[in-house]
Image: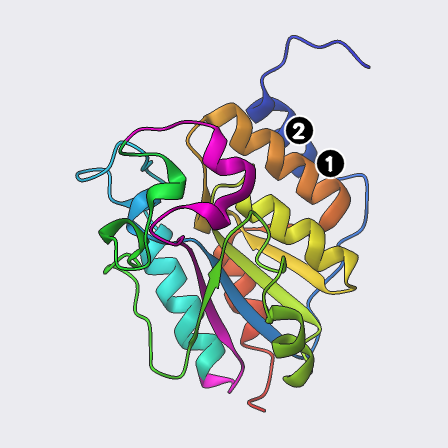
Amino acid sequence: MIPTDKTAKQIYHEWQAAPRVPPRGMGQRVALLNVDVQRRYTDTDAFASAYTGHPRQFEAINTLAATVRALNMPVIWTYVAYLPSGVDAGWWSKLSDNEMSIHKVGHDSPQAEIDPRVAVHDSDLKLHKRMASAFFETHLLSYLNWHHIDTVIVTGGATSGCVRGTIVDAMSYGYRVIVPEECVTDREESAHYASLYDIAFKYGDVKPVDEVLADLSERKPA
């Protein structure tokens, strides 16, 4: 272990200035995977579990979604919710027991609602998940395979939790991964930047959203 007195943010920005691995790049068939952009994590006025992101987060996610739809490629929104008893939450049901415990988020709970600031279309897939990765015990893999996807663009939160878990699985299944930096967020700054560093080093490309949109502009509709 290399000791350092640098912050995670400093380490990440040093990586940005001089990355030590080549970019993976964007393939020909992309899916936009928006991880848990639900009010439990986005509505800071209503829920103590929520946290703020980049000022452009919602506008940029909407622009990405519209761009991917125009290419006739999939837009996916995941959300976390559980049975009324919470028995399907596994170990997460044992972490706490109060009104804001995650296993108490029911399917009809306001906490499970996708944030109204993002534009979800009828053609989009709303995908229920129970654990961190959007791939775990869902039909996401078969859905991406059916659409011949080779690249997933991942947004949402938390960078150190469900976003990272989803990205690790996506890379493990052989997908290219792209993370628009303004479109992911976390409760703690240090966890956010440490995760961006790890993702950029090991799992995918972390890029400004405008660069991602420029890359998408080079794709032709399916």
Q: Is residue 155 left or right of residue 30?
A: left
Residue at 53%, 41% (x, y): give it. Answer: 159
Circle 2 packing at 10 Å, graded few (<14), some (14-19), many (20+), is few
Tell me what residue is drawn at x 58 percent, y 53 percent: 179
Q: Amino acid at mark 1?
A: Ala
Considering depth in this image, is 129 or 151 the residue closer to the camera? 129
Q: Which residue is located at x 52 percent, y 33 percent?
A: 192
Whether residue 9 is situated above or below residue 137 in the rendered picture: above
**Residue beneath label 1, please?**
18
Q: Which mark is residue 14?
A: 2
Q: Image height check: is 187 above or below 201?
A: above
Q: Is residue 96 magenta?
A: yes
Q: Residues within 10 Å of mark 1 (few under 14, many from 20)?
A: few
Vertical order, 85 against 123 (above or below): above
Find residue 176 and report its horizontal and vertical position in percent. 72, 63
| Contact between labelled residues 1 and 2, with CB atoms less than 8 Å apart | yes
